[in-house]
Amino acid sequence: MNSYTAIRGCFFDFIDDPWKHLGNDRAAARFERDGLLVIEDGIIRDFGPYADLAEKYSGVPLTHIRDRMILPGFIDGHIHFPQTRVLGAHGAQLLDWLQTSIFPEEEKYADRDYAEEAAEHFFNALLAGGTTTCQAFTTSSPVSTEAFFEEAARRQMRVIAGLTGIDKFAPPDTLISADDFYRESKRLIEQYHRCGRNLYAITPRFAVGCTEEMLTYAAQLKREHEDCWINTHISENPTEVRAARTEFPECSDYTAVHEKHGLLGAKFTAGHGIWLSNDEFRRFSQAGAALAFCPMSNLFLGSGLFRLGRALDPEHPVRLALGSDMGAGNAFSLIRVLDEAYKVGLCNNTMLDGSVNPLQQDLAEAERNKLNPYRAFYLATLGGARALYLDDLLGNFQPGKEADFVALDWTAGQQAISWRQSLTTKTGSPATIDEAAELLFGIMALSDDRSVAETWIAGQCAYRKESTDTAREA
Ligand code: GUN
Ligand code: ZN
Protein backbone atom coordinates (compact mmCIF):
# COMPACT_ATOMS: atom_id res chain seq x y z
CA MET A 1 0.00 0.00 0.00
CA ASN A 2 1.38 3.36 -0.96
CA SER A 3 1.49 5.98 1.76
CA TYR A 4 -0.02 9.36 0.96
CA THR A 5 0.25 12.52 3.01
CA ALA A 6 -0.54 16.16 2.31
CA ILE A 7 0.92 19.37 3.69
CA ARG A 8 -1.08 22.57 3.75
CA GLY A 9 0.72 25.87 4.26
CA CYS A 10 2.46 28.85 2.71
CA PHE A 11 5.01 27.74 0.10
CA PHE A 12 7.92 29.52 -1.61
CA ASP A 13 10.14 27.92 -4.25
CA PHE A 14 11.90 28.59 -7.55
CA ILE A 15 11.25 27.56 -11.09
CA ASP A 16 14.14 29.47 -12.66
CA ASP A 17 17.40 31.31 -12.02
CA PRO A 18 16.77 34.87 -10.73
CA TRP A 19 20.00 36.08 -12.33
CA LYS A 20 18.25 35.46 -15.66
CA HIS A 21 15.56 37.93 -14.61
CA LEU A 22 17.63 40.85 -13.33
CA GLY A 23 15.32 43.60 -12.16
CA ASN A 24 12.36 41.23 -12.12
CA ASP A 25 13.82 38.47 -9.96
CA ARG A 26 10.42 37.45 -8.64
CA ALA A 27 9.68 35.94 -12.08
CA ALA A 28 11.99 33.08 -11.11
CA ALA A 29 10.07 32.32 -7.90
CA ARG A 30 6.71 30.88 -6.95
CA PHE A 31 4.59 31.73 -3.93
CA GLU A 32 1.52 29.82 -2.78
CA ARG A 33 0.03 31.71 0.11
CA ASP A 34 -2.28 28.81 0.90
CA GLY A 35 -0.95 25.78 -0.92
CA LEU A 36 -1.16 22.02 -0.82
CA LEU A 37 1.73 19.62 -1.31
CA VAL A 38 0.67 16.03 -1.92
CA ILE A 39 3.27 13.35 -1.23
CA GLU A 40 3.25 9.65 -2.08
CA ASP A 41 6.00 7.48 -0.59
CA GLY A 42 8.33 10.45 -0.20
CA ILE A 43 7.77 11.80 -3.72
CA ILE A 44 5.79 14.93 -4.57
CA ARG A 45 2.68 13.93 -6.52
CA ASP A 46 0.87 17.24 -6.74
CA PHE A 47 1.36 20.86 -5.76
CA GLY A 48 -0.82 23.93 -6.11
CA PRO A 49 -3.35 26.20 -4.43
CA TYR A 50 -5.20 24.50 -1.58
CA ALA A 51 -8.51 25.70 -2.97
CA ASP A 52 -7.87 23.88 -6.28
CA LEU A 53 -6.60 20.59 -4.85
CA ALA A 54 -8.37 20.10 -1.51
CA GLU A 55 -11.37 18.27 -2.88
CA LYS A 56 -9.35 15.92 -5.06
CA TYR A 57 -7.23 14.86 -2.06
CA SER A 58 -9.88 15.06 0.64
CA GLY A 59 -9.17 11.46 1.72
CA VAL A 60 -5.43 12.05 2.25
CA PRO A 61 -4.17 12.66 5.82
CA LEU A 62 -3.41 16.36 6.11
CA THR A 63 -0.87 18.28 8.17
CA HIS A 64 -1.48 22.01 8.31
CA ILE A 65 1.73 23.92 9.04
CA ARG A 66 0.58 27.37 10.11
CA ASP A 67 2.48 30.64 10.34
CA ARG A 68 5.55 29.24 8.59
CA MET A 69 7.06 29.61 5.16
CA ILE A 70 7.75 26.23 3.57
CA LEU A 71 10.78 26.08 1.25
CA PRO A 72 12.55 23.18 -0.45
CA GLY A 73 15.21 21.75 1.89
CA PHE A 74 18.53 23.55 1.80
CA ILE A 75 21.40 22.03 -0.18
CA ASP A 76 24.94 22.35 1.15
CA GLY A 77 27.34 21.73 -1.72
CA HIS A 78 30.51 21.61 0.39
CA ILE A 79 30.88 20.45 3.98
CA HIS A 80 33.32 18.32 6.01
CA PHE A 81 31.74 15.59 8.12
CA PRO A 82 34.91 14.94 10.22
CA GLN A 83 35.28 18.58 11.21
CA THR A 84 32.06 18.62 13.23
CA ARG A 85 33.85 18.77 16.55
CA VAL A 86 36.45 21.37 15.60
CA LEU A 87 34.32 23.98 13.90
CA GLY A 88 35.35 27.43 14.93
CA ALA A 89 39.04 26.61 15.53
CA HIS A 90 40.84 29.83 16.28
CA GLY A 91 43.62 31.79 14.73
CA ALA A 92 45.07 30.39 11.50
CA GLN A 93 44.75 30.51 7.74
CA LEU A 94 44.14 27.45 5.57
CA LEU A 95 47.42 25.54 5.44
CA ASP A 96 48.35 26.04 9.12
CA TRP A 97 44.76 25.44 10.18
CA LEU A 98 44.75 22.08 8.38
CA GLN A 99 47.94 20.96 10.12
CA THR A 100 47.15 22.18 13.61
CA SER A 101 43.38 21.77 13.99
CA ILE A 102 42.05 19.52 11.27
CA PHE A 103 44.30 16.58 10.42
CA PRO A 104 44.68 15.48 14.09
CA GLU A 105 40.89 15.44 14.48
CA GLU A 106 40.22 13.66 11.18
CA GLU A 107 42.60 10.85 12.18
CA LYS A 108 40.18 9.88 14.97
CA TYR A 109 37.62 8.83 12.35
CA ALA A 110 39.47 5.58 11.68
CA ASP A 111 37.77 4.48 14.91
CA ARG A 112 34.29 3.22 14.07
CA ASP A 113 32.71 4.19 17.39
CA TYR A 114 34.03 7.72 17.10
CA ALA A 115 32.91 8.05 13.49
CA GLU A 116 29.43 6.75 14.28
CA GLU A 117 28.97 9.10 17.21
CA ALA A 118 30.16 11.97 15.02
CA ALA A 119 27.71 11.03 12.26
CA GLU A 120 24.82 11.42 14.69
CA HIS A 121 26.01 14.87 15.75
CA PHE A 122 26.62 15.82 12.13
CA PHE A 123 23.19 14.93 10.78
CA ASN A 124 21.40 16.34 13.82
CA ALA A 125 23.15 19.64 13.25
CA LEU A 126 22.40 19.62 9.51
CA LEU A 127 18.69 19.05 10.06
CA ALA A 128 18.50 21.71 12.76
CA GLY A 129 19.81 24.15 10.18
CA GLY A 130 17.27 23.11 7.56
CA THR A 131 19.83 21.35 5.36
CA THR A 132 18.36 18.22 3.82
CA THR A 133 21.09 17.39 1.28
CA CYS A 134 24.83 17.83 1.40
CA GLN A 135 27.91 16.97 -0.59
CA ALA A 136 30.44 16.01 2.07
CA PHE A 137 34.09 15.22 2.52
CA THR A 138 34.83 12.33 4.85
CA THR A 139 38.40 11.32 5.75
CA SER A 140 41.05 9.12 4.18
CA SER A 141 39.82 6.23 6.35
CA PRO A 142 37.03 4.18 4.69
CA VAL A 143 35.47 3.76 8.14
CA SER A 144 34.37 7.41 8.15
CA THR A 145 32.80 7.09 4.70
CA GLU A 146 30.92 3.99 5.81
CA ALA A 147 29.69 5.67 9.00
CA PHE A 148 28.54 8.66 6.97
CA PHE A 149 26.56 6.68 4.40
CA GLU A 150 25.05 4.36 7.02
CA GLU A 151 23.74 7.27 9.09
CA ALA A 152 22.44 9.13 6.02
CA ALA A 153 20.62 5.98 4.93
CA ARG A 154 19.06 5.55 8.38
CA ARG A 155 17.68 9.06 7.99
CA GLN A 156 16.73 8.51 4.34
CA MET A 157 18.65 11.61 3.33
CA ARG A 158 19.88 12.40 -0.18
CA VAL A 159 23.64 12.85 0.20
CA ILE A 160 26.81 12.86 -1.88
CA ALA A 161 30.10 11.82 -0.29
CA GLY A 162 33.23 9.80 -0.83
CA LEU A 163 36.52 8.64 0.59
CA THR A 164 38.92 11.59 0.78
CA GLY A 165 42.10 11.12 -1.24
CA ILE A 166 45.23 12.79 0.15
CA ASP A 167 48.66 11.19 -0.26
CA LYS A 168 51.00 14.05 0.63
CA PHE A 169 51.17 17.28 2.61
CA ALA A 170 49.81 15.78 5.85
CA PRO A 171 50.95 13.60 8.77
CA PRO A 172 51.26 9.86 7.89
CA ASP A 173 48.03 8.87 9.65
CA THR A 174 46.05 11.37 7.56
CA LEU A 175 47.34 9.96 4.28
CA ILE A 176 46.11 7.13 2.09
CA SER A 177 48.25 5.68 -0.69
CA ALA A 178 47.01 6.20 -4.24
CA ASP A 179 46.62 2.41 -4.65
CA ASP A 180 44.53 2.09 -1.49
CA PHE A 181 42.47 5.12 -2.47
CA TYR A 182 41.64 3.52 -5.80
CA ARG A 183 40.82 0.11 -4.35
CA GLU A 184 38.78 1.38 -1.40
CA SER A 185 36.92 3.99 -3.50
CA LYS A 186 35.89 1.23 -5.89
CA ARG A 187 34.64 -0.95 -3.06
CA LEU A 188 32.71 1.94 -1.51
CA ILE A 189 31.18 2.92 -4.87
CA GLU A 190 29.94 -0.62 -5.35
CA GLN A 191 28.57 -0.75 -1.81
CA TYR A 192 26.96 2.68 -1.50
CA HIS A 193 26.47 4.51 -4.80
CA ARG A 194 22.74 4.74 -5.57
CA CYS A 195 22.05 2.51 -2.59
CA GLY A 196 18.92 4.20 -1.22
CA ARG A 197 19.51 7.93 -1.58
CA ASN A 198 23.31 7.74 -1.26
CA LEU A 199 25.44 9.05 -4.12
CA TYR A 200 29.18 8.70 -4.45
CA ALA A 201 31.73 11.44 -5.14
CA ILE A 202 35.28 10.56 -6.11
CA THR A 203 37.08 12.95 -3.77
CA PRO A 204 40.70 14.01 -4.36
CA ARG A 205 41.01 16.48 -1.47
CA PHE A 206 42.98 19.22 -3.27
CA ALA A 207 45.80 19.38 -5.76
CA VAL A 208 48.36 20.31 -3.11
CA GLY A 209 47.60 17.08 -1.21
CA CYS A 210 47.47 14.80 -4.26
CA THR A 211 50.31 13.23 -6.22
CA GLU A 212 50.09 12.78 -9.95
CA GLU A 213 49.30 9.13 -9.25
CA MET A 214 46.37 10.00 -6.97
CA LEU A 215 44.80 12.32 -9.59
CA THR A 216 45.36 9.71 -12.29
CA TYR A 217 43.50 7.16 -10.17
CA ALA A 218 40.69 9.67 -9.56
CA ALA A 219 40.34 10.04 -13.33
CA GLN A 220 40.36 6.28 -13.80
CA LEU A 221 37.62 5.90 -11.19
CA LYS A 222 35.53 8.48 -13.04
CA ARG A 223 36.03 6.64 -16.33
CA GLU A 224 35.03 3.36 -14.72
CA HIS A 225 32.09 4.89 -12.81
CA GLU A 226 30.85 7.71 -15.03
CA ASP A 227 27.71 8.15 -12.99
CA CYS A 228 29.70 9.24 -9.91
CA TRP A 229 30.34 12.80 -8.84
CA ILE A 230 33.76 14.44 -8.26
CA ASN A 231 34.38 16.71 -5.28
CA THR A 232 37.48 18.75 -4.47
CA HIS A 233 38.85 22.19 -3.50
CA ILE A 234 40.35 24.85 -5.75
CA SER A 235 42.04 28.26 -5.42
CA GLU A 236 41.07 28.93 -1.84
CA ASN A 237 44.14 30.63 -0.45
CA PRO A 238 47.03 32.41 -2.19
CA THR A 239 49.70 30.28 -0.52
CA GLU A 240 47.80 27.16 -1.57
CA VAL A 241 47.54 28.47 -5.15
CA ARG A 242 51.29 29.06 -5.24
CA ALA A 243 51.93 25.56 -3.88
CA ALA A 244 49.72 24.06 -6.59
CA ARG A 245 51.69 25.96 -9.24
CA THR A 246 54.95 24.60 -7.79
CA GLU A 247 53.64 21.02 -7.62
CA PHE A 248 52.22 21.07 -11.16
CA PRO A 249 54.64 23.34 -13.06
CA GLU A 250 53.43 22.04 -16.40
CA CYS A 251 49.92 23.41 -15.71
CA SER A 252 49.30 27.04 -16.59
CA ASP A 253 46.88 27.51 -13.69
CA TYR A 254 45.04 25.59 -10.95
CA THR A 255 42.09 24.66 -13.18
CA ALA A 256 44.50 23.16 -15.71
CA VAL A 257 45.47 20.54 -13.10
CA HIS A 258 41.92 19.19 -13.24
CA GLU A 259 41.69 19.59 -17.01
CA LYS A 260 44.92 17.71 -17.50
CA HIS A 261 43.50 14.75 -15.58
CA GLY A 262 40.15 14.83 -17.33
CA LEU A 263 38.29 15.66 -14.14
CA LEU A 264 36.71 19.02 -14.98
CA GLY A 265 33.22 18.46 -16.37
CA ALA A 266 29.62 17.78 -15.41
CA LYS A 267 29.13 16.60 -11.82
CA PHE A 268 32.49 18.08 -10.79
CA THR A 269 32.39 20.52 -7.86
CA ALA A 270 35.27 22.45 -6.39
CA GLY A 271 34.97 24.45 -3.20
CA HIS A 272 35.98 28.12 -2.96
CA GLY A 273 37.48 29.28 -6.29
CA ILE A 274 38.27 32.66 -4.76
CA TRP A 275 41.43 33.25 -6.74
CA LEU A 276 40.29 31.87 -10.10
CA SER A 277 40.94 34.07 -13.13
CA ASN A 278 38.22 35.17 -15.54
CA ASP A 279 39.52 32.59 -17.98
CA GLU A 280 39.26 29.82 -15.39
CA PHE A 281 35.64 30.84 -14.67
CA ARG A 282 34.99 30.60 -18.40
CA ARG A 283 36.46 27.09 -18.57
CA PHE A 284 34.39 25.97 -15.58
CA SER A 285 31.29 27.28 -17.30
CA GLN A 286 32.06 25.57 -20.60
CA ALA A 287 32.82 22.28 -18.90
CA GLY A 288 29.55 22.35 -16.94
CA ALA A 289 31.58 22.15 -13.72
CA ALA A 290 30.43 23.78 -10.49
CA LEU A 291 31.93 25.89 -7.74
CA ALA A 292 30.79 25.87 -4.15
CA PHE A 293 30.63 29.41 -2.80
CA CYS A 294 31.67 29.16 0.87
CA PRO A 295 31.60 32.72 2.24
CA MET A 296 31.48 31.84 5.91
CA SER A 297 34.62 29.74 5.59
CA ASN A 298 36.29 32.18 3.22
CA LEU A 299 35.93 34.90 5.84
CA PHE A 300 36.67 32.73 8.87
CA LEU A 301 40.02 31.58 7.41
CA GLY A 302 40.67 34.97 5.83
CA SER A 303 40.87 33.33 2.40
CA GLY A 304 39.30 36.17 0.45
CA LEU A 305 36.20 37.46 -1.29
CA PHE A 306 34.65 35.20 -3.94
CA ARG A 307 33.85 37.18 -7.11
CA LEU A 308 30.21 36.21 -7.23
CA GLY A 309 29.20 38.70 -9.91
CA ARG A 310 32.10 37.73 -12.13
CA ALA A 311 31.43 33.99 -11.77
CA LEU A 312 27.87 34.70 -12.92
CA ASP A 313 28.86 36.57 -16.08
CA PRO A 314 25.86 35.87 -18.35
CA GLU A 315 28.19 35.07 -21.28
CA HIS A 316 29.57 32.08 -19.38
CA PRO A 317 27.96 31.64 -15.98
CA VAL A 318 29.47 29.08 -13.63
CA ARG A 319 27.11 26.69 -11.86
CA LEU A 320 27.14 27.72 -8.20
CA ALA A 321 26.18 25.88 -5.06
CA LEU A 322 26.41 27.29 -1.56
CA GLY A 323 28.73 25.60 0.90
CA SER A 324 28.99 25.97 4.63
CA ASP A 325 32.44 24.34 4.47
CA MET A 326 31.92 23.53 8.14
CA GLY A 327 34.44 23.36 10.09
CA ALA A 328 36.32 26.14 8.27
CA GLY A 329 32.89 27.69 8.10
CA ASN A 330 31.97 28.29 11.72
CA ALA A 331 28.36 27.10 11.46
CA PHE A 332 26.21 24.48 9.78
CA SER A 333 23.49 27.00 9.02
CA LEU A 334 23.04 27.96 5.36
CA ILE A 335 20.94 30.86 6.65
CA ARG A 336 24.10 32.23 8.22
CA VAL A 337 26.06 31.40 5.10
CA LEU A 338 23.62 33.57 3.13
CA ASP A 339 24.22 36.44 5.54
CA GLU A 340 27.95 36.19 4.85
CA ALA A 341 27.40 35.78 1.11
CA TYR A 342 25.37 38.97 1.05
CA LYS A 343 28.18 40.89 2.74
CA VAL A 344 30.82 39.46 0.38
CA GLY A 345 28.77 40.68 -2.58
CA LEU A 346 28.59 44.18 -1.16
CA CYS A 347 32.30 44.24 -0.28
CA ASN A 348 33.11 43.32 -3.89
CA ASN A 349 31.02 46.26 -4.97
CA THR A 350 33.14 48.74 -3.02
CA MET A 351 35.62 48.31 -5.85
CA LEU A 352 33.17 47.72 -8.69
CA ASP A 353 31.08 50.83 -8.12
CA GLY A 354 34.11 52.91 -9.13
CA SER A 355 34.22 54.96 -5.96
CA VAL A 356 37.77 53.83 -5.14
CA ASN A 357 39.11 53.65 -8.68
CA PRO A 358 36.90 54.67 -11.61
CA LEU A 359 38.90 52.34 -13.88
CA GLN A 360 37.61 49.34 -11.94
CA GLN A 361 33.99 50.32 -12.29
CA ASP A 362 31.75 47.51 -13.60
CA LEU A 363 28.15 48.22 -12.74
CA ALA A 364 26.79 45.11 -14.43
CA GLU A 365 29.04 42.87 -12.37
CA ALA A 366 28.17 44.90 -9.29
CA GLU A 367 24.48 44.30 -9.90
CA ARG A 368 25.09 40.54 -10.06
CA ASN A 369 26.88 40.66 -6.69
CA LYS A 370 23.76 41.86 -4.90
CA LEU A 371 22.28 38.91 -3.08
CA ASN A 372 18.64 39.84 -2.78
CA PRO A 373 16.41 37.19 -1.13
CA TYR A 374 15.35 35.67 -4.45
CA ARG A 375 18.94 35.06 -5.52
CA ALA A 376 19.98 33.97 -2.03
CA PHE A 377 17.33 31.31 -1.48
CA TYR A 378 17.62 30.17 -5.10
CA LEU A 379 21.28 29.33 -4.40
CA ALA A 380 20.30 27.46 -1.24
CA THR A 381 17.70 25.35 -3.09
CA LEU A 382 17.20 24.97 -6.86
CA GLY A 383 20.51 26.65 -7.73
CA GLY A 384 22.40 24.20 -5.53
CA ALA A 385 20.46 21.30 -7.03
CA ARG A 386 21.34 22.45 -10.55
CA ALA A 387 25.01 22.95 -9.67
CA LEU A 388 25.20 19.42 -8.29
CA TYR A 389 23.15 17.90 -11.13
CA LEU A 390 20.45 16.90 -8.67
CA ASP A 391 17.66 19.06 -10.08
CA ASP A 392 15.89 16.06 -11.57
CA LEU A 393 15.43 14.94 -7.95
CA LEU A 394 15.45 18.03 -5.75
CA GLY A 395 15.30 21.78 -5.51
CA ASN A 396 11.64 22.74 -5.78
CA PHE A 397 8.09 21.45 -5.39
CA GLN A 398 7.64 20.09 -8.91
CA PRO A 399 5.72 16.79 -8.92
CA GLY A 400 8.09 13.83 -9.29
CA LYS A 401 10.75 15.36 -7.04
CA GLU A 402 11.64 14.19 -3.57
CA ALA A 403 9.67 15.75 -0.73
CA ASP A 404 12.43 17.32 1.37
CA PHE A 405 11.46 20.70 2.79
CA VAL A 406 11.92 23.14 5.61
CA ALA A 407 9.33 25.21 7.51
CA LEU A 408 10.72 28.60 8.47
CA ASP A 409 9.47 30.78 11.31
CA TRP A 410 10.06 34.34 10.19
CA THR A 411 9.59 35.72 13.70
CA ALA A 412 12.29 33.55 15.33
CA GLY A 413 15.86 34.71 15.64
CA GLN A 414 17.44 37.53 17.53
CA GLN A 415 15.19 39.45 19.90
CA ALA A 416 14.48 42.26 17.48
CA ILE A 417 13.41 40.10 14.55
CA SER A 418 9.72 39.87 15.16
CA TRP A 419 9.20 43.62 15.33
CA ARG A 420 11.40 44.05 12.25
CA GLN A 421 9.33 41.50 10.35
CA SER A 422 6.05 43.09 11.44
CA LEU A 423 6.99 46.10 9.34
CA THR A 424 6.65 43.86 6.28
CA THR A 425 3.59 41.81 7.18
CA LYS A 426 0.92 44.06 8.45
CA THR A 427 -1.52 41.14 8.48
CA GLY A 428 0.91 38.86 10.32
CA SER A 429 1.66 36.66 7.31
CA PRO A 430 2.97 37.36 3.81
CA ALA A 431 0.28 38.42 1.36
CA THR A 432 2.44 38.77 -1.76
CA ILE A 433 5.58 37.21 -3.17
CA ASP A 434 7.53 40.38 -2.45
CA GLU A 435 6.39 40.40 1.17
CA ALA A 436 7.43 36.77 1.44
CA ALA A 437 10.84 37.58 -0.08
CA GLU A 438 11.32 40.48 2.32
CA LEU A 439 10.59 38.17 5.27
CA LEU A 440 13.17 35.75 3.89
CA PHE A 441 15.68 38.57 3.74
CA GLY A 442 14.89 39.33 7.39
CA ILE A 443 15.64 35.71 8.21
CA MET A 444 19.00 35.65 6.42
CA ALA A 445 20.08 39.00 7.81
CA LEU A 446 19.00 38.43 11.41
CA SER A 447 18.75 34.75 12.11
CA ASP A 448 20.14 31.20 11.90
CA ASP A 449 18.93 27.76 13.11
CA ARG A 450 16.37 29.53 15.27
CA SER A 451 14.25 30.17 12.15
CA VAL A 452 14.09 26.49 11.32
CA ALA A 453 10.88 25.25 12.90
CA GLU A 454 10.72 21.90 11.10
CA THR A 455 12.76 19.91 8.61
CA TRP A 456 11.10 17.17 6.58
CA ILE A 457 12.84 14.33 4.76
CA ALA A 458 11.01 12.28 2.11
CA GLY A 459 7.63 13.45 3.35
CA GLN A 460 8.30 12.84 7.04
CA CYS A 461 9.17 15.26 9.80
CA ALA A 462 12.80 14.60 10.72
CA TYR A 463 13.36 17.59 13.01
CA ARG A 464 11.11 19.87 14.99
CA LYS A 465 12.46 22.75 17.01
CA GLU A 466 11.61 22.03 20.62
CA SER A 467 10.43 25.41 21.71
CA THR A 468 8.29 25.92 18.63
CA ASP A 469 4.60 25.73 19.24
CA THR A 470 3.38 24.80 15.76
CA ALA A 471 -0.38 24.98 15.60
CA ARG A 472 -1.87 22.01 13.77
CA GLU A 473 -5.12 20.61 12.67
CA ALA A 474 -5.93 17.21 11.29
N1 GUN B 1 41.63 22.30 1.39
C1 GUN B 1 42.03 21.03 1.61
N2 GUN B 1 41.40 20.50 2.67
C2 GUN B 1 40.57 21.44 3.13
C3 GUN B 1 39.65 21.49 4.21
O1 GUN B 1 39.46 20.55 4.96
N3 GUN B 1 38.97 22.65 4.36
C4 GUN B 1 39.14 23.72 3.54
N4 GUN B 1 38.44 24.81 3.76
N5 GUN B 1 40.01 23.71 2.54
C5 GUN B 1 40.73 22.58 2.34
ZN1 ZN C 1 36.31 22.40 2.30
Image (cartoon, rainbow, N blue to C red):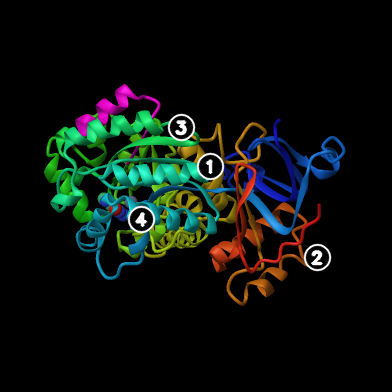
What amino acid is labelled 2 in the image? Thr
Pointer 4 local density, CA inside 10 Å: few below 14, some 14–19, many at least 20: few
The residues tagged by marks 3 and 4 sit, at their Cα atoms, a distance apart of 54 Å
Residue 156 got which mark? 1
Q: Say whether disc 2 or disc 3 marks the residue closer to the N-terminus.
A: 3
Residue 222 on image: x %, y %: 31, 27
Please give the residue where the numbered disc 3 appears in the rendered image.
195
* Residue placed most toward the observer, 387 or 276: 387
Measured along the vertical axis of the image, is residue 4 above or below residue 419? Answer: above
Measured along the vertical axis of the image, is residue 281 above or below residue 339? Answer: above
Please give the residue where the numbered disc 2 appears in the rendered image.
427
Q: Say whether disc 4 or disc 2 marks the residue closer to the N-terminus.
A: 4
Residue 134 on image: x %, y %: 45, 46
Q: Secondary structure at mark 2?
A: loop
* Residue placed most toward the observer, 331 or 456: 456
Q: Residue furthest front?
A: 113
* Marks 3,4: beta carbons within 8 A: no
Q: Say whether disc 3 or disc 4 marks the residue closer to the N-terminus.
A: 3
